[in-house]
C-alpha cells in the first residue's frame, strides 16, 4: 500500500485554501465525472481518486490528520494512542480520530483506496461537506444470435460474484440496452447503487437478414418451377412453410410472407414480414435430349 | 394516454431529490426533459428519471449551469449515436 498524495491529485500545494480545494475538485470532477465519460474505466478510476482526495482535503479534521502524518501515515494510529494515553493521564478530555469505528461504515469501502481506508476507516461520516454519490453504472455487452433474439429467453449474468437472471424479450434490436436498476457499483456516502446496462449485440445470421421487424432471405428456385409455377417449401424462423410460386417468376422477384418475420419488441403475437428473394438456378449438365428440347423451345 | 403509475409530479421529484422546482422547469424549457400534462396536471414520465438524475448530478455536484448541461446533453447524445454506429459497423465487419 503506497502513500497517496492527495494534493498532487488535485494539482494543489499544501497551503491551498478550502476555496481552492473546492475549485480544483470541481474542475477535475467536471473532466472525469462518470456521467461525462460513459464506458470509460480510466476516467471512472481517476474520478474515484479525485473524489477521495476531495473527501480528505475538504474535511478540516481529515486534512489535519493527513497533513500531520503525511508519509508516516502508517504510524498514525500508534501516535494517536500514545498521545491519548498521555493526555488521559493528565486528566484532559481528548477526542481521537480513531479507526473505522469513528466513522460510519454504511457504504462499501471498496470505493476508496486501501490507503484511505487504513487512515480514515471505511467511511467518512464526519465530513461536513459530504456529498452523496450514486454508484458507478456498469456497462456490459452480450452477444446473441438472431435465432436467440427471435424468442423471449433468459440468461444468467455474473456481476460482482452475484448471479443475475435477465429476461431478453423477443424482438430486441441490435445495440439495444437493457437496464437493471441497482445492479451497478455501490453508492458513496450512502448514495444509491448505480445501474447495470447490458447492450445486446445480435450476430448476423447466414440465412436471414433483419431490417427492423422484417426478415429477408434468398431462396434458390429451379427453372421449371419458376417458369411453370408451383410450390416451394422454405425455412422460416418459425419452421417450414409451403410457398406458392406464381408461373413466370423472374430471377430476383420477391414474395412477401405476412407475419413470418421477426417478432415486434414487447408486442406479443405481432410479427414483421418475411421477404423472399427468388434466385433462379439454371439447370446444368444437360443431356443431349434436354438441349434439343431447349433449342426447340428457343425457336418456338 | 400514459399509464398513470408511470408518472410522477415535478413536486414529488423535487421533494425526493431535494431540488428546486425552477430547476425542473428550466430543464423542460431547454427541452432536456419533457413535462406532460394529464387532465391539466403536470407530470414527468418515469422513463425520464434517469436523465433527470444525471442533470441533477451535473448541476448540483459539478456546478454546471443550464447552458452547459444543454451542451453536454447534446454531445453525449452524439457520442451515444457514434457508439451505436461503431457497434453496427463492428457487427458488419464480423461477416
Image: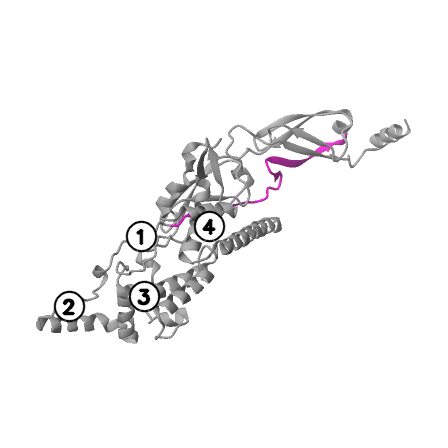
Query: On the image, numbered disc 3 is attached to which residue?
Result: A56
Residue A94: assigned label:
2
Q: Mark 3, mark 4: which one is toward the viewer?
A: 3
In the rendered structure, the answer to whether residue A86 lies left or right of residue B44 reads left
Q: Residues within 10 Å of mark 4 (few under 14, many from 20)?
A: some
Which quadrant of the figure has residue A43? bottom left
Q: Mark 2, mark 1: which one is toward the viewer?
A: 2
Q: Residues within 10 Å of mark 2 (few under 14, many from 20)?
A: few
CA distance for labels 3 and 4: 32 Å
Tell me which segment is drawn in magenta: A194-223
Tell which subunit mark 4 falls on. Answer: A
Query: On the image, numbered disc 1 is attached to which residue?
Result: A190
CA distance for labels 3 and 1: 17 Å
Quick check: is A202 in the magenta stretch? yes
| Position above or below: B63 against A157 | below
| Position above or below: A99 against B11 | below
CA distance for labels 2 and 1: 29 Å
Q: Decide if residue A236 is in sight here.
A: yes
The x, y position of residue B35, in whole percent, is 48, 40
Amino acid at each position: 500500500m503506497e502513500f497517496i498524495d492527495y494534493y498532487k491529485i488535485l494539482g494543489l500545494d499544501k497551503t491551498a485554501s478550502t476555496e481552492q480545494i473546492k475549485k480544483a475538485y470541481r474542475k477535475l470532477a467536471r473532466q472525469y465525472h462518470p456521467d461525462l465519460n460513459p464506458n470509460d474505466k480510466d476516467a471512472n478510476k481517476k474520478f474515484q481518486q479525485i473524489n477521495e482526495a476531495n473527501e480528505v482535503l475538504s474535511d478540516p479534521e481529515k486534512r489535519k490528520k493527513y497533513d500531520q502524518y503525511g508519509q508516516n501515515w502508517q504510524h498514525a494510529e500508534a501516535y494517536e494512542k500514545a498521545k491519548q494515553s498521555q493526555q488521559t493521564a493528565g486528566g484532559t478530555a481528548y477526542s481521537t480520530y480513531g479507526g473505522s469505528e469513528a466513522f460510519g461504515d454504511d457504504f462499501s469501502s471498496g470505493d476508496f483506496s486501501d490507503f484511505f481506508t487504513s487512515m480514515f476507516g471505511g467511511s467518512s461520516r464526519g465530513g461536513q461537506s459530504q456529498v452523496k454519490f450514486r454508484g458507478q453504472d456498469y456497462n456490459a455487452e452480450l452477444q446473441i444470435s438472431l435465432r436467440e433474439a427471435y424468442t423471449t429467453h433468459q440468461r444468467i449474468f455474473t456481476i460482482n460474484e452475484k448471479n443475475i437472471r435477465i429476461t431478453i424479450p423477443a424482438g430486441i434490436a441490435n445495440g439495444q440496452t437493457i437496464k437493471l436498476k441497482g445492479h451497478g457499483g455501490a453508492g458513496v456516502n450512502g448514495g444509491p447503487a448505480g445501474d447495470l446496462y447490458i447492450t445486446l449485440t445480435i450476430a448476423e445470421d447466414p440465412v436471414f437478414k433483419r431490417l427492423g421487424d422484417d426478415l429477408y432471405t434468398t431462396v434458390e428456385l429451379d427453372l421449371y418451377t419458376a417458369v411453370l409455377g408451383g410450390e416451394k417449401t422454405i425455412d422460416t424462423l418459425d419452421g417450414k412453410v409451403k410457398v406458392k410460386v406464381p408461373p413466370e417468376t423472374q430471377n430476383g422477384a420477391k414474395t412477401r410472407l405476412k407475419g413470418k418475420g421477426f417478432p415486434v419488441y414487447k408486442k406479443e403475437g405481432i410479427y414483421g414480414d418475411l421477404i423472399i428473394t427468388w434466385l433462379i438456378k439454371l439447370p446444368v449438365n444437360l443431356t443431349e435430349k434436354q438441349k434439343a428440347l431447349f433449342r426447340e423451345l428457343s425457336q418456338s | 394516454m400514459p399509464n398513470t403509475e408511470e408518472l410522477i409530479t415535478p413536486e414529488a421529484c423535487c421533494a425526493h431529490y431535494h431540488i428546486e422546482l425552477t430547476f425542473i422547469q428550466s430543464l423542460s424549457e431547454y427541452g432536456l426533459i419533457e413535462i406532460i400534462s394529464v387532465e391539466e396536471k403536470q407530470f414527468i414520465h418515469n422513463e425520464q428519471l434517469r436523465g433527470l438524475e444525471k442533470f441533477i448530478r451535473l448541476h448540483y455536484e459539478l456546478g454546471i449551469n443550464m447552458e452547459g448541461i444543454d451542451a453536454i446533453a447534446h454531445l453525449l447524445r452524439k457520442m451515444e449515436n457514434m457508439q451505436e454506429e461503431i457497434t453496427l459497423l463492428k457487427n458488419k465487419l464480423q461477416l
